[in-house]
Amino acid sequence: MKKRINRAKDKLIKYIKRVKVEHLIKKYIDNNVIFLTFVLTCVLNSTLLRFFTMHTIENYLAFKPILADVTILILVGSFGYLFKPKNRFLYFMICEIFFTAICMINSCYYTFYTSFASVSMLSLTQYITSVGDAVVENVMQPKDFVYLIGPIILVINHIRIKKKSYYKKIETKPERKKRTIKTLTVGGVLAVLFSVTLTPLDVTRFAKQWNREYIVMRFGIYIYQFNDVVTSLQPKINSLFGYDNAMKSFKEYYENTSDEPQKNEYSNIFEGKNVLVIHAESMQTNLLDLEFNGNPVVPNLKKLASEGMFFSNFYSQVSVGTSSDSELTYNTSLMPTQSGTAFVSYFDRDYNATPKYMSELGYYTFCMHANNADFWNRRNMYEHLGYQKFFSKETYKVDKENVVGLGLSDKEFFKQSVEKLKDVNSKQDKWYGLMIMLSNHTPFSDVEKYGKFDVDIKEKSSDEEAGEISHPYMEGTKLGNYFKSAHYADEALGELFVSLEENGLLDNTVVVLYGDHDARLPKREYNYMYNYDKETNKMYDKTDERYKEYDSYQYELGRKVPFIIWTKDMKDTKLNMEVKNVMGMYDVMPTLGNMFGFYNKYQLGHDIFNIKDDNIVVFPTGNWVTNKVYYNSQKEEYLSLDNSAISEDEIKKNSEYASKLLNVSNNIITYDLIAKLKQEKEILNYKEGE
Ligand code: GP9
Ligand code: MN
């Protein structure tokens, strides 16, 4: 009996509690109709935007962007409580229109560009006007108006509650403050919850802001747009201060630089020839010497290197902008910027760039890359580098079957590119084209698509019957997968050359190939490779006398990438050679410029055939390398490369050179000094003419 009474008591308490909670919820909803409508409709809109753009269910119902949206909307909405109820609707309506506009703009921008919008585009007024008509005619679709549902629901709710005299209820000032603080606290707690779900990759991508889909997927469209405004304004703000000093040091730096190029035996040797530049993704020089069971990892690259001009001590000089930084240093002989990336934050600067010079020499200049044109903001940067045409993903047929890693497989990319090149070749007198490879890209995990290339150690067994035995060696390791991936990319290169030759496209063409940067694999992977004990299938123990640590210097020096200049008739001529002098990506423009007949006074690198063994390659970190020494500026340590003694003076002199060079490079880009200098000269000429 007692039990029954207790049970009934429990039930009653539960019921009262539930009724109380339900009552509280109802009361909260009744009192916060406009705030809740604002939050929910804006979340609905951002979800609809993901639905119409990124299509898959995982995308539009993903938890992280929804959490991010809710957080930002609660934070923004909480300030609405500072207004008297009768003015509150206006605040929420303005916010609602603002957030709806973000969704609508992005929705139609995506249709046109398969990417999300950026305010940095506003600086491209000419581009906006030319696109303007096209947007109205071709891009606005019914789906872009769906987002108006947000403001409509808000207005309906406003009318509904107005009738119930909702707005007549006047809250006191302290009450309003209390509500604001309570709502802000909820937003704050959600913000903390959201931050703990972020990975380091999320944070770095957020800071860089170029991988737009990724950011929208992690941070939601509203935070994306806010971050976009901040990152777009940052370069403008940076360049407001320190201009005079920057210009002064820039002029001093080039005071003694000649206006004319220094001639040598390679001057103009390739004048008038077509140029095919190949950006070999993540290709390292050390692959050229590597084989497994007698099979070279990159036989086609080896062949090119052995038949052409091979620069075997060549470094890429990239910073966080990886591929884009290597394109920047290659094309402009400038270094990556100290903050942000040139391609994203400073794309609108005036660059003295190879495609621009080649255009001036009468070449048709273009780039082919089967990735999204907004990746690294190439679409915009390429106009400033002087490419006349960009064949990006839109111009390629990409099916599920021909995707490897990040996108269209290199084999298919080359196949389709040759068709485009045939067309270019038939229409243009001479051309300069860049092909950017993609398949050999970190994390190198699409292994089953790379084709068969074993990275084990095969041996004949002493036991006749057992036949061949295999020690796993690099199988299943990241580095091993990289070798398989590089082998695939190399096969693609092989196929490209066959097809170019079949189509007569190599007849009057110079091929220039560079590895854009190293594979960015950890040192321990190499340590494993060089210390592998096949008997135990483990690494040698550190105490074992055969153990040789792959140290940080070996690692840094191992990051070399191939640079090759090749023509089909170069073999066994005096141009068929290995250049062993240390060389950096910023030396390419001066070296090629001399061969094709253009000169950029503001190049930071040198023509390798003028500077010869006196060269120095500076890295964005301030580290540098010469033929004699590698210097680590962070640790202030160096490694002698030829066992000669290095004086303190030499280290100091080179370090000062490196820091001046990095500074002037950064100033040129941040303050747009090349454009400013041109303007100064024009004003001077005008005054003289008066
Ligand atoms: C993307 C490709 C790779 O289009 O160039 O860029 P990365 O990740 O190497 O900088
Ligand atoms: Mn790259």
Image (tube, rainbow, N blue to C red):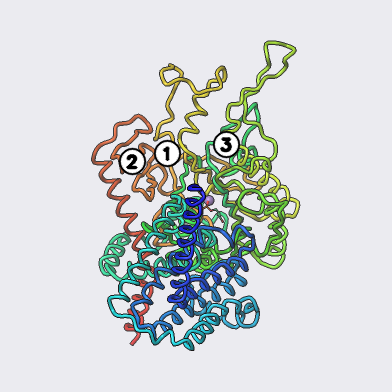
**Could you tell me the amino acid type at mark 1?**
Glu
Q: Nearer the viewer, residue 603 or 384?
A: 384
Residue at 67%, 11% in the rendered image: 462
Is 390 rendered above or below residue 517? below
Q: Which residue matches tag 3?
A: 288
Q: Nearer the viewer, residue 282 or 512?
A: 282
Q: Nearer the viewer, residue 30 or 154?
A: 30
User: Are circles 2 and 1 on residues that touch, CB within 8 Å?
Assistant: yes
Mark 3, secondary structure of its residue: helix
How far, Cα to Cα, is label 1 from label 3?
17 Å
Residue at 32%, 68% in the rendered image: 181
The percent position of residue 615, horizontal first and vertical second, equals: 39, 45
Q: Which residue matches tag 1?
A: 556
Q: Quadrant of residue 574?
A: top right
Q: Quadrant of residue 192?
A: bottom left
Which residue lies most toward the front here? Answer: 1
Please tell me whether mark 2 or mark 3 is closer to you in this view. Answer: 2
User: Which mark sits nearer the N-terminus, 1 or 3?
Assistant: 3
Q: Is mark 1 within 8 Å of ligand 2?
A: no
Q: Which residue matches tag 2?
A: 632
Q: Residues within 10 Å of mark 1 (few under 14, many from 20)?
A: some
**Could you tell me the amino acid type at mark 2?**
Asn
- The C terminus appears in which quarter of the rendering? bottom left
Please tell me whether mark 1 or mark 3 is closer to you in this view. Answer: 1
